[in-house]
Amino acid sequence: MSFKEIDIKELEVSPFEKIGKQWMLITAGNKESFNTMTASWGGLGVLWNKNVAFTFIRPSRYTFEFCEREEYFTLTFFAEEYRKALSFCGSKSGRDFDKCKETGLTPVFSAEAPYFEEAELTLVCKKLYAQDMDKSAICDDFVNTHYGEAEPMHKMYVGEIIKAFIKE
């Protein structure tokens, strides 16, 4: 299967559906070493006059190391038939498992960061901003009780969407 690069302004998706319900894979690294993880937190929008995507990763996740090290990351979205693969990528660590081998996902290395041949949509993002979330800045009681005292907060990554690919 091949991909077609499209202008991000042509994209008609609901981030609530794509991210919150269908989930996505966040991937960073290179051909020699990369990792991916499933996420259901994030969004799409405009910041500093740039089209951006933002997502959140806990420091304990293996993908965190790659996002810290690399300048680019990808967000990939899949059809429902890949739900089991996304569940695996969200519950198992790349430190312990070869996620591509276990799920059958095929990495593609034709962009600034890896993505997957089976994806319906891929957003290639260049990191613009990253910041640790701060418990003292949370204004919602429910959210404040979501995190245990010893549990580290996520780090937020904002990336400029520099390319968007859809499956042809």
Image (spheres, grey):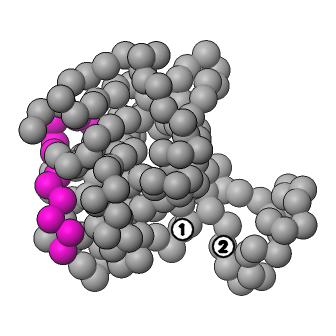
In depth, the one of 45 and 17 nearer the eye is 17
Badge 1 amino acid? Pro
Q: Which residues are magenta?
A: 102-112
In depth, the one of 1 and 145 nearer the eye is 1
Residue at image location 56% in from the left, 53% down from the top: 20
Residue at image location 61% in from the left, 16% down from the top: 49
For the N terminus, the quadrant is top left
Majority secondary structure in the magenta region: loop
Residue at image location 28% in from the left, 30% down from the top: 165
Can residue 36 be seen in this snapshot?
Answer: no
Q: Dot 2: few (<14), some (14–19), or many (≥20) neighbours within 10 Å?
A: some
Q: Which comes sooner in the sequence, label 2 or label 1?
A: 1
- Percent position of residue 31, x then y: 15, 51
Q: Could you say which disc has been placed on residue 152 in the image?
A: 2
Measure how far apart labels 2 and 1 are at the Cα level.
7 Å
For the C terminus, the quadrant is top left
Up the image or down, 18 lies above or below 144; here it is: above
Is 158 on the left-hand or right-hand side of 120?
right
- Percent position of residue 41, x then y: 58, 54
**Helix, strand or loop under label 1:** loop
Q: Quadrant of residue 54?
A: top right
- Percent position of residue 8, x then y: 42, 21
In depth, the one of 18 and 100 nearer the eye is 18
Residue at image location 74% in from the left, 81% down from the top: 148
Up the image or down, 149 lies above or below 27; here it is: below
Is 57 on the left-hand or right-hand side of 8?
right
Inspect the magenta stretch and tell me whether residue 33 lies in it.
Answer: no
Q: Badge 1 is on which residue? A: 59
